[in-house]
Amino acid sequence: MNFASTLTFSDIITQNRLLESVVERMDFPKSSWKRPIAEVCQKTVYSEDFALAVLKAFDENQQFPTDLLLQFPLRAILNYLKATHRYYLERKLPEIEQTFFNLIADYNVTHPDLVRISSLFIDYKKELTAHIVEEETTLFPYIEHLMFYAENSNEDKAMYIEVANYSLKQFEESHEDVEKSLSNIRELIYHYAPQDSMVMPFRVFLLQMDFFEKDLNCHGMMEDFVLMPLAIQLEQKIKL
Ligand SMILES: [Fe+2]
Ligand SMILES: [Fe+2]
């Protein structure tokens, strides 16, 4: 992917359609996609370099840019991860679920097994939603406390106690790889579904899950290899 300073989001999306969802979740208004990214970013919480680094993370032709992403502020990473959670809960999961509901409506009578096996996605949706809620209500507020305390070390001792009673190590140990388990479900659905039941909406359903799986994989790497090391570094600094 070629990134030049006059580059627009439209240019990037033309080169790789899958990146549209990344630009969308970062809330860059569609009306700005044809303007230079540097100019568009000035009005948002993201810098141009950060937006480009995130897009790079989704480029399947390149290695995940861990070192590059580790150079950005924890605040930027956290903002991006929160936007991604919102995007999953409000857009992606309902979209895939809608495809599943269409499958039920059209094929419940003629292909009951297909519908039954596809319903595994609904269980997965619940599991992933719980995982996101857990991160949003425990891990992310904790990291925000760490950032607050780092910036206001003389101000709030109560905050320090809150920081001291929890550790990121605890979270890391209990952080299940729920992002990865979607691929098991997709493979299960694929293998158990008889080939003659491969009706078109079912193919769309599998394809949507496949794209979502790649997105989740990238999200998981962003949490494990970027968010956590940066947060642990800050936590160690504060607890010294
Ligand atoms: Fe997450
Ligand atoms: Fe996670």
Image: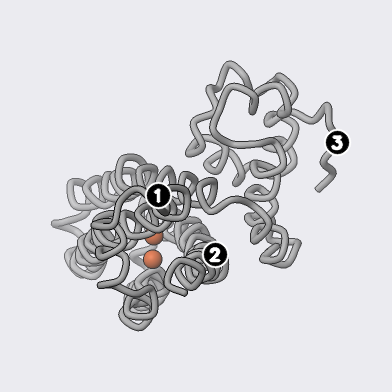
Residue pointed to by mark 3: 4
Label 2: element kind: helix
Which amino acid does the dot numbered 3 rest on? Ala
Q: Tag 1 or tag 3, which sits nearer the N-term?
A: 3
Q: Return the residue nearer the eye: 147 or 105.
A: 147
Q: Position of 203 compared to 115: left or right?
A: right
First in sequence: mark 2 vs mark 3: 3
Residue drawn at (70%, 52%), measured in percent from left and top? 56
Residue at image mark 2 = 230
Mark 1 lies within 8 Å of ligand 1 (Cβ measured): no
Query: Which residue is the site of mark 1?
Result: 148
Do the numbered discs 3 and 1 sit on residues whose CB atoms are within 8 Å?
no
Q: Is mark 3 within 8 Å of ligand 1?
A: no
Q: Can you give x and y, in whole percent of width and height, for residue 81 in the image?
A: 45, 51
Number of marks in picture: 3
Q: Residue at x 40, y 58 (%)?
A: 146
| Disc 3/disc 1 C-alpha distance (Å) | 35 Å
Q: Nearer the viewer, mark 2 or mark 3?
A: 2
